[in-house]
């Protein structure tokens, strides 16, 4: 009983603290993700006030956070849109992958971390934070701009790439033999393919099963189905988060919009818990030695994302101001980057990988939205001059 009371006290204090930090982020006009990570650093090992009882409970909440994040991200798209996006933006997507995965892999190899850590760091530097980017586009009124579909198509391409990358990374981190790894990867890719085919051909049947005029029933069905598929995916060596993402893709139209509205509060709560949990796993005393490397890696990543956005927007016939906006919108890092780093840290890829990833995401999650606000007047001037 005493232990349960401590759990409630600790978890309640964490959630209340996150609310205060979120309010502060809104007032300042930045993403709350860096503040959530800082909170985790403060309450984790080596922090100001380490949690004694609730860390295991928070870890379960963190896993739910990842599942709900990817589920709501999947609800943004349908299977037809994904296929169209792959066909129309494959070249820009490949350029995005090469330009932005390379810095992480190269830095890891130069630091002597080995090929496994290099593979993980490639994923850490590759993926843009869809959540932060969507918020930047909305806050700055860029949603209706011509370059926005280009940005969104790159985000979709990245999400699909992650759906293939995560099973491969999981097999590599597990240290499987070549044959065992190949079998695991084949099962994982087969699972992703089957779910995509089901979403394309039987999406209406799934929607008919899930649909309900009652919001409570709809919420229970969507979350239950997502957790069920996530669990099956995990058993088949596919990331649970990817399973949830594919469930979101299977739902579309009015049903997806209603599900998003119902899931938003749950997603925000558990997503915040997820970022805190990653901070809990990272010893803040180890960030100092890698801070310089993280800053340099962040600078390189900003340049490569700016080049990516400019290239993709130019192919779509968009003017200079739009190309600049596209590149800036792609700078933030957040959800997927921390998920990948968390997998690598849990597998013991390298002790410095977690601190480096935390510092890297802190810099880009904070600077991305801030940079967009700061350069907005200059972009407007460029547009007027053009």
Image (cartoon, rainbow, N blue to C red):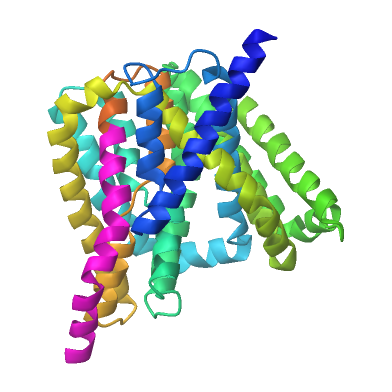
Q: Position of residue 120 (x, y in %)?
A: 34, 32
Residue sticking out furthest to the top:
2
Residue in the image at 57% along x and 42% along y = 269
Relative to 303, is 221 on the left or the right?
A: right
* Count of all numbered marks drawn on residues in the image: 0
Of residues 34 and 134, the one nearer the viewer is 34
Residue in the image at 29% along x and 77% along y = 322
Q: Position of residue 263 (x, y in %)?
A: 66, 51
Residue in the image at 54% along x and 35% along y = 15
Location of the C terminus (image quadrant): bottom left
Residue 95 visible in the displayed image? no
Residue in the image at 22% along x and 67% along y = 374
Q: Position of residue 107 (x, y in %)?
A: 17, 34
Location of the N terminus (image quadrant): top right
Of residues 6 and 265, the one nearer the viewer is 6
Q: Is the magenta region chiefly helix, strand or loop?
A: helix
């Amino acid at each position: 009983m005493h232990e349960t009371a401590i759990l409630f006290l600790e978890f309640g204090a964490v959630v209340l603290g996150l609310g205060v930090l979120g309010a502060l982020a809104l007032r300042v006009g930045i993403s709350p993700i860096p503040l959530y990570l800082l909170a985790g650093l403060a309450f984790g090992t080596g922090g100001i006030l380490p949690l004694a009882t609730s860390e295991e409970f928070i870890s379960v909440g963190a896993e739910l956070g990842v599942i709900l994040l990817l589920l709501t991200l999947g609800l943004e798209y349908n299977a037809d849109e994904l296929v169209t996006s792959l066909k129309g933006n494959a070249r820009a997507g490949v350029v995005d992958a090469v330009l932005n995965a390379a810095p992480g892999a190269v830095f890891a190899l130069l630091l002597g971390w080995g090929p496994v850590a290099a593979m993980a760091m490639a994923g850490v530097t590759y993926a843009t934070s869809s959540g932060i980017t969507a918020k930047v586009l909305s806050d700055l009124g860029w949603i209706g701009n011509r370059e926005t579909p280009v940005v969104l198509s790159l985000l979709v391409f990245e999400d699909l790439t992650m759906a293939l990358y995560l099973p491969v990374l999981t097999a590599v981190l597990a240290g499987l033999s070549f044959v065992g790894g190949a079998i695991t990867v084949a099962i994982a890719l087969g699972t992703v393919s089957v779910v995509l085919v089901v979403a394309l051909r039987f999406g209406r049947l799934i929607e008919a099963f899930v649909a309900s005029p009652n919001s409570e029933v709809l919420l229970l069905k969507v979350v239950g189905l997502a957790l069920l598929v996530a669990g099956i995916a995990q058993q088949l060596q596919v990331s649970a988060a990817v399973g949830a993402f594919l469930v979101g893709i299977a739902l579309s139209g009015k049903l997806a919009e209603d599900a998003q509205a119902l899931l938003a509060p749950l997603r925000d709560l558990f997503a915040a818990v997820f970022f805190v949990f990653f901070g809990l796993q990272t010893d803040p005393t180890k960030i100092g030695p890698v801070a310089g490397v993280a800053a340099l890696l962040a600078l390189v990543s900003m340049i490569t994302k700016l080049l990516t956005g400019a290239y993709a927007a130019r192919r779509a016939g968009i003017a200079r101001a739009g190309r600049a906006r596209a590149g800036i919108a792609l700078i933030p890092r957040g959800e997927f980057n921390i998920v990948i780093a968390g997998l690598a840290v849990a597998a013991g890829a390298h002790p410095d990988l977690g601190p480096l990833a935390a510092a890297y995401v802190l810099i880009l999650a904070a600077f991305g939205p801030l940079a967009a606000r700061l350069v907005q007047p200059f972009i407007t001037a460029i547009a007027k001059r053009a």
